[in-house]
Image (spheres, coloured by chain):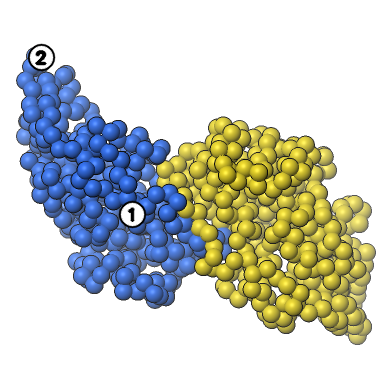
Chain colours: A blue, B yellow
Amino acid sequence: MSVAGPSTEVWQGRAVRLVRRPQGRPVVDDFSWDVETVGPLEEGQVLVAVSDVSIDPAMRGWMTAAKSYIPAVELGQVMRAAGAGVVRESRHAGFSPGDLAVGLLGLRELAVVHGDSLIRSAPSLGVPSEVLVGGLGGTGLTAYFGLTDVGAVRSGETVLVSAAAGAVGSVVGQVAKILGCRAVGLAGGPEKCRHVVEDLGFDACIDYKARAEDLVAAVHEACPDRVDVYFDNVGGAPLEAALATLSHGARIVLCGAVSQYNADHQGWHGPRNYMNLLVRRASMRGFVLFDYADRYAEGALQLAGWWAEGRLKFHHTFVEGLDAYVDALNRLWDGDKLGKLVLRIG
Amino acid sequence: MSVAGPSTEVWQGRAVRLVRRPQGRPVVDDFSWDVETVGPLEEGQVLVAVSDVSIDPAMRGWMTAAKSYIPAVELGQVMRAAGAGVVRESRHAGFSPGDLAVGLLGLRELAVVHGDSLIRSAPSLGVPSEVLVGGLGGTGLTAYFGLTDVGAVRSGETVLVSAAAGAVGSVVGQVAKILGCRAVGLAGGPEKCRHVVEDLGFDACIDYKARAEDLVAAVHEACPDRVDVYFDNVGGAPLEAALATLSHGARIVLCGAVSQYNADHQGWHGPRNYMNLLVRRASMRGFVLFDYADRYAEGALQLAGWWAEGRLKFHHTFVEGLDAYVDALNRLWDGDKLGKLVLRIG
């Protein structure tokens, strides 16, 4: 409900600020936890009580001063984060108290943002807040546009995806199956591989830790018709193994390089066998979800439909409380999670 | 002129065979020079007295057992090579003695091949044999299709090309200029850079040896609007510098990696900053000229027209005699040449 009159009310909530640029793995001293005052609401703004924060590998890049696709988080600012929560107050016609809302709310308990920057989910839709920030949010959309648009996948092709038990990778493989492809995952450890095949329905999953010595052979075995689309979330050895197994005209979708994010630039590992792109007449293309903003509705509706039909499953790993942010973040590199990593607060 | 009756005549000529797979730089002991007997001509075949052999970086790959886009040259076989020469005898309706012919003739003085695998150039056209194997042959076509089709270049864009004083690179930049682009080269040494700008008409040329310490800054200076198409012939540091300077939506055309060809696979250097493809929503795509076989005529006519109009210049470095093959080949890595490297024999 839009509130016409001026408001003077303010609120207090905890927030996490970036106070130092991490060297390598982020540590607690790179951040501060304090109480901020938000409000009063200006016309068009809403107050959201954040319940779920999306913990993304991209956060590591946002902490680095180097130029990237969006500006780095400035020192002293509340850490950028996608989140979902319940609208408490609204001076925007599109939102009423009790609505679920998702958007870039920041790493905080209470967010005041313009309603135009939020997506509303009516409580009657019954979409859980963790799904709003995950499978039906940026995570799912990244998988969907990366696979279908950047990867230009076609029915009958073989799709290989790294971090297959992770947030984006798990959706990539499931969507590949829905579209009639062979879906093969790469994941670390037998339990994740079991999950990927048995719970998510991939055709196969390679334990890249167990097969580190002969990863190329493992990919060949799992992809006898070679790899038509490789969706890369990790870089490193899996990227090289995929490059060694490309089909003629294959596409590599660069979504992330999580194995590399904590190295400084000189320590990054480039794919030594990138000239397989020539041998196989293949391409490697990067993308950023924000470029698909005008197609979010299309992607979200498609994903929501499959999810409602039970054909697409979203798994979550929850970590509790703002104080656990650094631990949660580092679980991304350690692989100590299944599916979407969500910081649950408030 | 087609010769109807059976032929019994045979001919003898010198040939170069691959007898050992090179480790690192090719050496004389990797090859043998001997006399082979060719003929008699079967129906459809022609006898060509080879005059010009194209010395290509791709030859290094053809010597390696690893699978590539075409089978490796087998040990004991005459080395694969594109060449041009004069038809001496013909049992193919399309060729008469005195015609110039170009094709995969091998590293030999006398070649007997089926006329269907050759391209004919009537003597009256006046195209020199070195131009047939170079600017109007595979070299020029590689530049043309790489830039226009793989690179999808558009007027007004900035095209950066490595090995700009070399066979393919020199054509890439000149075609870029003809198409209305800013053409910037990378070459080794002041004389090559002078040649690229003054003789070939590029807008600028970066001496990558002199600017090794600040190559990224040098590319930024020469490409103030960033790089829309990077045509890569060399790999290594220039590829990383280009990746650091891509425009939004840029295309990297992978044509070669001449800085890497003599390293074993573990010694190859992958581009550490390949994730700039994501930041810039850019692509890196490899291609092989053979895939454009059905468009060779289109490309050759286009190039021949520009050449006849004087808008496209081809420079050559000649090395004399089959005995000089290994020296000639190694000039490719040492950069000790200008334009197209041609082994002149017979």
The amino acid marked with disc number 1 is Val
Question: Residue B196, position in %: x, y?
Answer: 74, 41
Give the residue at x 15% y 40%.
A84
Q: Quadrant of residue A227?
A: bottom left
Have a look at marks 1 and 2 and say if they share a chain. yes
Among the two numbered marks 1 and 2 on one chain, the one whose residue lies closer to the N terminus: 2
Task: Name the residue beneath numbered marker 2.
Answer: A6
Residue B212, placed above or below residue A75 = below
* Camera-nearest residue between A135 and B333: B333
Task: Name the image quarter holding the C terminus of chain A.
Answer: top left
Q: Secondary structure at mark 1?
A: loop
* Camera-nearest residue between A30 and A154: A30
Q: Chain of mark 1?
A: A
From the viewer's perspective, is the residue at label 1 or at label 2 nearer?
1
User: Is residue B78 rendered to the left or right of residue A212?
Assistant: right
**Which label number is shown at residue B249?**
none
Give the residue at x 91% y 85%.
B8
Q: CB of mark 1 within 8 Å of CB of mark 2? A: no
Question: Residue B120, position in %: x, y?
Answer: 83, 61
Task: Name the image quarter holding the N terminus of chain A.
Answer: top left
Question: Residue A34, position in %: x, y?
Answer: 13, 34
> Within 10 Å of the Cα at label 2, are there few (<14), some (14-19), or many (20+) other Cα atoms?
few
Q: Quadrant of residue B327?
A: bottom right
Residue B63, placed above or below residue A340 = below
Q: Secondary structure at mark 2?
A: loop
Residue B108, placed above or below residue A284 = below
- Residue pushed farthest bottom? B8
Task: Name the residue beneath numbered marker 1.
Answer: A258
* Residue B198 visible to an observer of this rendering: yes
* Residue B200 visible to an observer of this rendering: no
Q: Chain of mark 2?
A: A
The amino acid marked with disc number 2 is Pro
